């Protein structure tokens, strides 16, 4: 891993990021008056507060259209690379990721764009590489989603081209299945001539194999923390056998209130206002994407299973719901299972983050999962 991102590479035992704040409603699928307003001002305020609290990173969603329904989640979203440039300019320490869809960004263009933004942030850009599943969005561009495993084959070529450009040297030809380049070159190299951290999400066998070969940070899902122990240990072991140290992160939806009863009551309120049109659209998209998969995660996605609160609050991701002690207990369970970092989302990021900071961070410090911030 690049030593530019010291907080992620050598920092707290349990790293924390903010996930999805560049999009309207974030990762919540409910029609609520307090749904996240992803204005530019709100994003800048959130980035500044997350940095002041010692969070390690911001991770955006890349969306080109919303999910429909009454609230149209993610219907308004800042393009992730331009957003990352702004967030880097507004902060001094945070790592800020961009989320790049491989089929929609030519590697020659993407390499130069990302290197430019990396200089703006003095080496704090990270790359969340998405090989693609958004068939509805791809049709807007006149692009067809490839068969599942072929997406990662294209991703390998895309990342190999970018790495060669970032390495500098003489112009090169590239004769691949998906890209054919003649005398390719590009400058500047990333800041300090070292590379941004790269993360990708992939739960299928092909996705995990891709991560083990190329990723610094792998985004993986959770059914229960305990069910993930063997899987995460295997992922890290196989990466080590290829000479690579790789972290594993997971998204987590957080509802933290002074009492367990208050947290559960709020979740019930959110579920009662679930946007079923948007949830149905998302479920159909996942089902189409998983139709060619035979692994256990593909079956899970086709079935559309999972607790309703997870689908409404966090797009199917794991949720930590309760009073501060309970939420910290859930964070500790995830860390004990092998997760190095959590990418958190809230119904209203700015309104909820102060309470999380006040109540959760000291408890995580007491457990030795995070270090106390120096004033």
Image (spheres, helix red, strand yellow):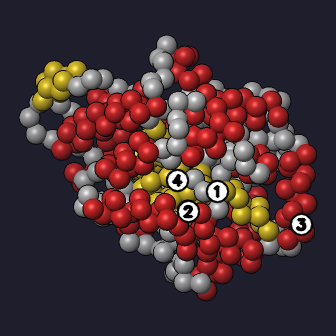
Q: Secondary structure at mark 1?
A: loop
The one nearer the camera, 37 or 365, is 365
Residue at 71% x, 39% y: name it. 304
Q: Which residue is mark 4?
A: 220
Query: What is the CA distance from the residue labelled 3 to the residue labelled 2?
Result: 29 Å
* Along the line of sight, the residue nearer the viewer: 120 or 24: 24
Residue at screen point 44% across, 45% down: 205
Judged by depth in the image, the label closer to the viewer, 4 or 2, is 2
In screen coordinates, is 302 left or right of 374?
A: right
For marks 1 and 3, give the one nearer the viewer. 1
**Mark toward the viewer: 3 or 2:** 2
In this rendering, is residue 138 above or below 63? above
Q: Residue furthest left?
A: 170
Instruction: Give me the residue at 77% from left, 64% from top.
Output: 321
Query: Mark 2 — residue?
Result: 228
Pointer 1 residue: 223
Instruction: State which mark lies toward you, 1 or 4.
Output: 1
Residue 329 in picture, x, y percent from top left: 68, 75
Nearer the observer, 316 or 325:
316
Label 1 and label 4: CA atoms lie apart by 10 Å
Left or right: 307 with respect to 151? right
Label number found at residue 262: 3
Vertical comparison of 301 with 233: above or below: above
Q: Residues within 10 Å of mark 3 (few under 14, many from 20)?
A: some
Please report the residue visible at 41 percent of the width from the left and 59 percent of the height from the top.
Answer: 235
Q: Earlier in the sequence, mark 3 or mark 2?
A: 2
């Amino acid at each position: 891993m690049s030593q530019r991102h010291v907080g992620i590479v050598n920092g707290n035992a349990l790293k924390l990021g903010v996930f999805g704040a560049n999009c309207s409603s974030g990762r919540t699928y409910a029609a609520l008056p307090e749904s996240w307003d992803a204005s530019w001002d709100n994003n800048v305020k959130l980035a500044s507060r997350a940095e002041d609290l010692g969070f390690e990173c911001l991770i955006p969603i890349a969306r080109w259209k919303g999910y429909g329904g009454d609230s149209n989640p993610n219907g308004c979203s800042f393009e992730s690379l331009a957003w990352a440039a702004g967030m880097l300019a507004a902060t001094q320490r945070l790592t800020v990721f961009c989320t790049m869809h491989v089929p929609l960004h030519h590697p020659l263009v993407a390499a130069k764009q990302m290197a430019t933004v990396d200089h703006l942030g003095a080496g704090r850009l990270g790359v969340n590489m998405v090989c693609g599943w958004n068939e509805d969005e791809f049709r807007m561009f006149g692009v067809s989603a490839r068969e599942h495993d072929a997406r990662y084959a294209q991703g390998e070529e895309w990342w190999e081209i970018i790495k060669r450009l970032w390495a500098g040297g003489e112009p090169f030809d590239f004769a691949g299945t998906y890209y054919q380049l003649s005398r390719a070159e590009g400058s500047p190299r990333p800041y300090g001539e070292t590379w941004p951290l790269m993360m990708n999400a992939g739960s299928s066998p092909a996705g995990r194999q891709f991560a083990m070969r190329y990723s610094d940070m792998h985004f993986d899902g959770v059914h229960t923390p305990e069910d993930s122990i063997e899987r995460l240990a295997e992922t890290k072991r196989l990466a080590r056998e290829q000479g690579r140290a790789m972290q594993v992160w997971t998204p987590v939806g957080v509802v933290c209130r002074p009492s367990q009863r208050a947290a559960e009551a709020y979740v019930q309120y959110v579920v009662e206002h679930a946007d079923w049109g948007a949830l149905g659209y998302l479920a159909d998209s996942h089902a189409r994407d998983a139709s060619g998969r035979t692994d256990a995660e593909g079956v899970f996605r086709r079935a559309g299973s999972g607790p309703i609160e997870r689908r409404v609050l966090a797009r199917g991701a794991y949720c930590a719901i309760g009073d501060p002690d309970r939420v910290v207990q859930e964070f500790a369970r995830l860390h004990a299972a092998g997760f190095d970092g959590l990418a958190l989302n809230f119904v209203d990021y700015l309104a909820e983050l102060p309470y999380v900071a006040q109540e959760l961070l000291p408890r995580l410090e007491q457990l030795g999962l995070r270090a106390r911030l120096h004033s």
